[in-house]
Image: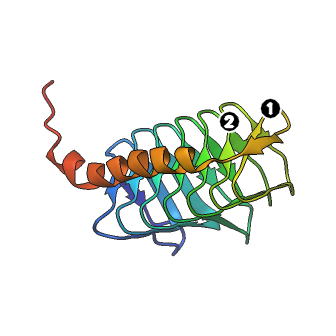
Amino acid sequence: MSVFEFEGRIPVIDPSAYISESATVIGKVTIGKEVWVGPGAVLRGDYGEIIVGSYTAIEENCVIHARPGETTRIGEHVTLGHGSIVHTGNISDWAVIGMAAVVSDFARVGTWAAVGEGAVVKSKSELPDETVSVGIPAKVVGNVSGEYKELWEKYKKNYNTFCQRYRNLRKIS
């Protein structure tokens, strides 16, 4: 993993978290318990701050950043899909951000909210708890069901097991 201090801003990473060796963590970044950070992800707390709650999965090639003096907050049990971008956003617990989706400046994604693949959550917008949103810009199209929650709880637990299992990766070439 590539973890860097930047001008006195030092990442704080819980020892139970897994950070891929090709991920980059810079500056004022706090990473909670059993957070899984996949290959190519970049968490850049160079002039803003990033706080990632416990049991969250940040999949491959995600980019997380914050404006100067501002904070990007990602709750507990959140899934950030492959290639998603979060910039000075606030993502509540249990949310799912789809692959290649964007959560822009000062937007808020509610608890158990689901953002579809490729959606763009515009600056300062708010997606309510337990809603499903898709499109550009993201618009609410439905509600999260109990079945959806049960399914995603299983998926999220799988990523938590990766924190330990990925420590046993064996490079073969």
Residue 6 seen: yes
The front one of 75 and 139 is 139
Report, in whole angstroms, how far the alpha carbon at label 1 lies from the one at label 2: 7 Å
**Residue shown at 46% from the left, 42% from the top:** 59
Please state which amino acid type lies under the numbered disc 2. Answer: Gly
Q: Which mark is residue 116?
A: 2
Q: Position of residue 48 (x, y in %)?
A: 66, 66
Across the whole image, how many numbered discs are drawn on residues? 2
**Horizontal side of residue 164 vs 12, given as left or right:** left
**Horizontal side of residue 31 vs 73, given as left or right:** left
The front one of 18 and 131 is 131
| Residue carrying label 1 | 135
**Residue shown at 15% from the left, 24% from the top:** 173
Q: Position of residue 122 (x, y in %)?
A: 84, 46
Splitting the image into 4 quarters, where does residue 134 fall?
top right
Q: Would you say the residues marked 1 and 2 are in contact, meaning their CB atoms lie under 8 Å apart?
A: yes
Q: Which mark is residue 21?
A: none
**Horizontal side of residue 38 vs 7, given as left or right:** left
Position of 63 relative to 25 (above/below): above
Position of 157 relative to 17 (above/below): above
The front one of 79 and 103 is 79
Splitting the image into 4 quarters, where does residue 83 fall?
top right
